[in-house]
Amino acid sequence: MYLKLKPALSLILLLLIHLPFAHAQQKSVDHQVDSLMRLMTLQEKIGQLNQYSDDWTATGPVTVDNDKTRQVRNGLVGSMLNCKGTDRTRWWQEAAMKSRLKIPLLFGQDVVHGYKTTFPIPLAEACSWDIDALSLSARTAATEASAGGIHWTFAPMVDIARDPRWGRVMEGAGEDPYLGSLIAAARVKGFQGNKLGDVNSVMACAKHFAAYGAAIGGRDYNTVDMSERMLWEVYLPPFKAAVDAGVATFMNSFNILNGIPATGNSYLQREILKGQWGFKGFVVSDWNSIGEMVTHGFVKNDYEAALAAITAGSDLDMESRCYKNNLAQLVTEGKVPLALVDDAVRRILEKKFELGLFDDPFKYCNAEREQKELNDPENPKIAREMAVRSIVLLKNQNNLLPLSKSTKTIAFIGPLVKAVKQNKGFWDVEVPGVDSGFIVSQWEGVKNKIGADAKLLYAKGCEIEGSDKSGFAEAVNIANQADVVILSIGERRNMSGEAHSRSNIGIPGVQEDLLKELLATGKPVVVLINAGRPLIFNYTADNAPAILYTWWLGSEAGNAIADVIFGDYNPSAKLTISFPLSVGQIPVYYSHLNTGRPASGQGNTSSYIDLSNYPKYEFGYGLSYSTFEYSNLTLSSDKMKSDEKLVATVIIKNTGKYAGEEIVQLYLRDVVSSIVRPVKELKDFKKIALKAGESKTITFTIDKEKLSFYNQQLKRVAEPGDFDLMIGASSKDIRLTDKFELVN
Ligand code: NOJ
């Protein structure tokens, strides 16, 4: 029995005293994994590669299987998902402890934007450009989730996304690989904390490997066809950044990439991830993505699917049962070398050891800690801070915002004003024993903020969807009584998210018609747009005097929205994805190449005859209640050798009345190169706080890496020649420019 050989706690302590360094600890983990694997039967090994969903909540198509508990007791399951709370995880772990070798289960969960405390959806958080805040959000989620028995989150999703029809744009960081990479690393570090094995750390999972965000037509799960160059330049960098940040696991993806399903793709998983990048963790399939290779037409049956997946480097089978049902036969028949199975098992067991589950399988099942962490009064404060930093001010005509707290009468109108759960966004986690009472609605947030004498009137006006306008009259009536109207409209929270692609990304139903009627009253209207993706709302954009894009902000949504409306927080977020003018422009993104005939409005140029080329709101756009002046751009030299660094400095002044933060963006263009480069690429940014009237000097350092790209042989090179340097408040609002030359 393994248990007899398993090092007792005293031995572990001894090891910790004598082998204090990471490599020594790794050696010890290797040694323990070796000893354990020597005792395992083939069936038990395959069991470690098998993951089931608990029956409580399903995040994919359910396979009815009443035999799961027996399989766990027989050591035929290595991991569970959708199993949460200390009671439930303890129950399953006790079942695993009845197995012959007592190998603990791993509990995974989609903790994507919070566990009990819900944070803004990831795309909204990304718009803060605030790396520390993003990391703290993930850290807080990890602390709560780990206290609820979770060892592993299926996050962050690091897929670059340039098509807002795709429902999962809400789950990533937007369109840009540079910013996406920084955010990927911040989230991984946040989830994993100081080190795996700390009781408040969870393993992170970079997903979905790879190129899932480029689904044709923005339709979820759809095929991806892209050049190697696009893959390396745009879609792979955030995954590489996650590896560099020490991510413990990867999830592969549902899509076909250039003819080969990602799950059965050796090039992605063996050659790039485990080969070139030296990734030592394990890869989980997506839900039944192994079995779905049959539907793709890549393999004939589940037997061949298992063969393709294990050969390609998919280690853990989420829910398809292809490994469980076929791997033993494949090994016995010599089609799959045992070494491949062993490698996958080893990767998974290593993580179980690193997490400390062999020392104490119930380490994460402490009900007292669960209570304490889930009720930590700091967590809502962190969520509120993250939420205010995620709200994007799109328009503020005549400085309508911020509103005065002593405004006499406010009409708060719209289908989302009193909504509660909607604010949680798509990936809210149903935590056992927790109801939604702690979520702050927009109504509550505003009500709590305004002065005692202020009057707050309410009308729903209409539903999110449908054509019913019967509530308009009441809405117009209260608008007429008010000094100002706040209108809260948008999508339902699950109109974006997995399997929620939309072809029409307008504001649904009659909500914009309601706005039209409210504007006709002549009252000033502040519009709040709640959504999980960039929507198209040209009428609102052109006619409403003030617009806040509030996304889905989580459990503190109401407080955060009120903080911004009434000026307790001066909005600082900027879009990390372009907002199209029309679906016909998609994909539209800032870092495009120049055509030979750039649009000029005349002659045969690359443009639409019925539509501008430019998005409604560009990448990097977002207003503040203040204004910022950019001046005095200086470069340390107009020439740079590739082993040198160039320093650009610029002075930023807050010229408004309010203290505020500005995200100063640095873009570069390689003017002439062997591979045509985008018209601009984000290469750095600084988010700075300035009091009213204050100036600061900002410094950017440009090194060879910032000038490099993949050449024809897909090697990273910086080619000598001219570079344009642009510093701006958005990708379009470039305030200062200069040039320099890279010399040999
Ligand atoms: C499918 C999703 O694509 C993936 O992101 C998620 O982690 C799994 N389901 C598990 O819920």
Image: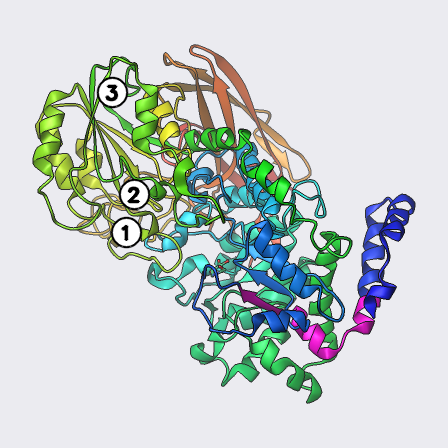
Q: Could you tell whether 101 is left or right of 419 in the image?
A: right
In the rendered structure, find residue 615 and report the number of the disc placed on it.
2
Q: Secondary structure at mark 3?
A: loop
Q: Is residue 716 visible?
A: yes
Task: Mark 1 or mark 2: name the one nearer the start of the chain.
Answer: 1
| Amino acid type at image mark 3 | Leu
Q: Please check the rendered image and state whether residue 12 is part of the magenta-colored stretch, yes or no.
A: no
Q: x and y percent of residue 415 in the render?
A: 23, 40
Q: Is residue 189 visible?
A: no
Q: Could you tell whether 237 is left or right of 590 in the image?
A: right
| Amino acid type at image mark 1 | Gln
Q: Please check the rendered image and state whether residue 41 is part of the magenta-colored stretch, yes or no.
A: yes
Q: Which residue is mark 1?
A: 585
Q: Secondary structure at mark 2?
A: loop
> Contact, CB < 8 Å: mark 2 with mark 3?
no
The span shown in magenta is 34-53
Q: In which quadrant will I find the C terminus?
A: top right
Residue located 65% across and 65% down the image = 95
Residue located 39% across and 66% down the image = 222
> Contact, CB < 8 Å: mark 1 with mark 2?
yes
Near-viewer residue (141 or 401): 141
